[in-house]
């Protein structure tokens, strides 16, 4: 009888291995990606257990989709305009990306569905924060000055938010979100 909970090689594929094990009387399979990298004339191998990725989190979904598209951290980071370190922290759910333009680039390159993985704040930012703020302000017959007073900011800040020149800070968004 095979040893329980020990992974064995089932099939070898280019750049991946299919592993299997018997656990609680059932056969489980896992795909293990192997990426060969050459850095400073040294060959490095990077292994990633694909089934271990929790894609219900923002970072897990990013990581799983990046691996499915056979893209390196560096490739994605360069297109999005962030550092490899930042992308690694995103994939480990240790950093929340709140830059609307960079979020859009990330979703575009990885074909991610923002509605499924974004926080409400991230969705607010990528779904035209300026239009949402202006619409709320006008619906409630508030001038930019009156609206600014609610958030303890000046009229110029509200104007920049409405014109998508700057992003509304998270703490101000929380106040806004409680108003709506």
Image (cartoon, rainbow, N blue to C red):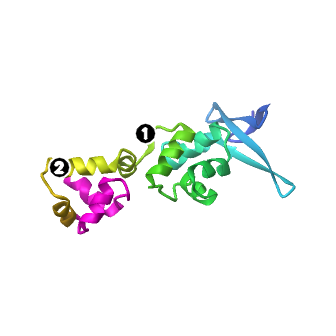
Task: Pick the residue in front: 129 or 87.
Answer: 129
Label 2 SS: helix
Task: Pick the residue in front: 133 or 67.
Answer: 133
Above or below residue 106? Residue 84 is below
Q: Is residue 153 left or right of residue 26?
A: left
Q: How many marks?
A: 2
Residue in view at x 67 percent, y 51 percent: 74
Whether residue 49 is visible, yes or no, is yes
The N terminus lies in quadrant:
top right
Please name the predominant secondary structure of the magenta segment in the image.
helix
Where is residue 149? Give x, y as percent: 19, 66
- Between circles 1 and 2, the one closer to the viewer is 2
Where is residue 2? Give x, y as percent: 75, 35
Q: Is 165 a magenta residue?
A: yes
Quote the CA–CA distance across marks 1 and 2. Answer: 30 Å
Whether residue 57 is visible, yes or no, is no
Instruction: List the residue tagged with mark 2.
Output: 138
> Which range of residues does the magenta coloring cover?
151-180
| Farthest residue, direction left | 141
Instruction: List the residue tagged with mark 1.
Output: 116
Residue in view at x 57 percent, y 59 percent: 86
* Crowd class of label 1 (few under 14; some 14 to 19; many from 20; radius 10 Å): few
């Amino acid at each position: 009888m095979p040893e329980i909970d020990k992974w064995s090689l089932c099939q070898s594929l280019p750049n991946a291995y299919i592993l299997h094990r018997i656990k609680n009387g059932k056969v489980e399979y896992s795909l293990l990606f192997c990426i060969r990298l050459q850095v400073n004339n040294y060959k490095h191998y990077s292994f990633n257990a694909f089934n271990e990725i929790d894609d219900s989190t923002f970072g897990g979904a990013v990581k799983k989709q990046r691996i499915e598209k056979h893209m390196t951290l560096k490739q994605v980071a360069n297109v999005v305009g962030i550092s490899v370190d930042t992308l690694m922290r995103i994939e480990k759910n240790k950093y929340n990306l709140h830059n609307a333009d960079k979020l859009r680039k990330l979703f575009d390159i990885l074909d991610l569905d923002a509605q499924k993985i974004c926080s409400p704040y991230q969705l607010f930012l990528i779904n035209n924060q300026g239009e949402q703020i202006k619409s709320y302000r006008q619906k409630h017959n508030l001038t930019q000055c009156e609206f600014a007073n609610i958030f303890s900011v000046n009229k110029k800040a509200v104007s920049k938010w409405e014109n998508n020149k700057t992003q509304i800070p998270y703490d101000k968004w929380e106040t806004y979100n409680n108003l709506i």
